[in-house]
Amino acid sequence: YATRYGLPYDLACAQITQERPNIENGVCINPCQITYEYFVGETMTVPIYDENGFTGNYDIFEITKEMLDSPEGNIRVGLAYLRTCVDKFDSLITGLFTYNQGESTLNIACEYYG
């Protein structure tokens, strides 16, 4: 999904590691720490990339609880959300900050630091 959504692979791995997923009975639960209330029922539209950049196509999908409960689905949604944050602010750093802290915290930081 990192490659599909045009994100650095190492960044995706680091983000998942930073989120400290829960391990229950040897199974990784919610690796991207996705909040159900915020995402379930939402439709995501995410640009698709390949080795040449944006392909002109989009990955469009509705988020379900079942998707978030599977490691693959959870990672897909987490990285899709990160891609939308990066695109919204046209910045990898600002997108990552927003992914982790939320847009309201970004607004506070911008007001404080200018």
Image (cartoon, rainbow, N blue to C red):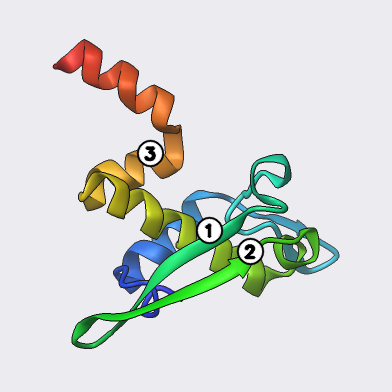
State if disc 3 and disc 1 touch (CB < 8 Å): no
Residue 5 horizontal/vertical position (percent) = 38, 72
Give the residue displayed 25% in from the left and 44% down from the top: 89
Q: Which residue is mark 1?
A: 78
Give the residue displayed 41% in from the left and 55% down from the top: 82
Q: Is 62 left or right of 50, judged from the image as shown? A: right
State if disc 2 and disc 1 touch (CB < 8 Å): yes
Residue 14 horizontal/vertical position (percent) = 40, 59
Above or below: residue 98 compared with residue 29:
above
Q: Residue furthest right?
A: 25
Q: Which residue is mark 2?
A: 74
Q: Where on the picture, by quarter, is residue 24?
A: bottom right
Circle 2: element type? helix
Callout 2 amino acid? Asn
Q: Residue furthest bottom?
A: 51
Circle 1: element type? helix
Q: Which residue is mark 3?
A: 98
Callout 3 amino acid? Thr
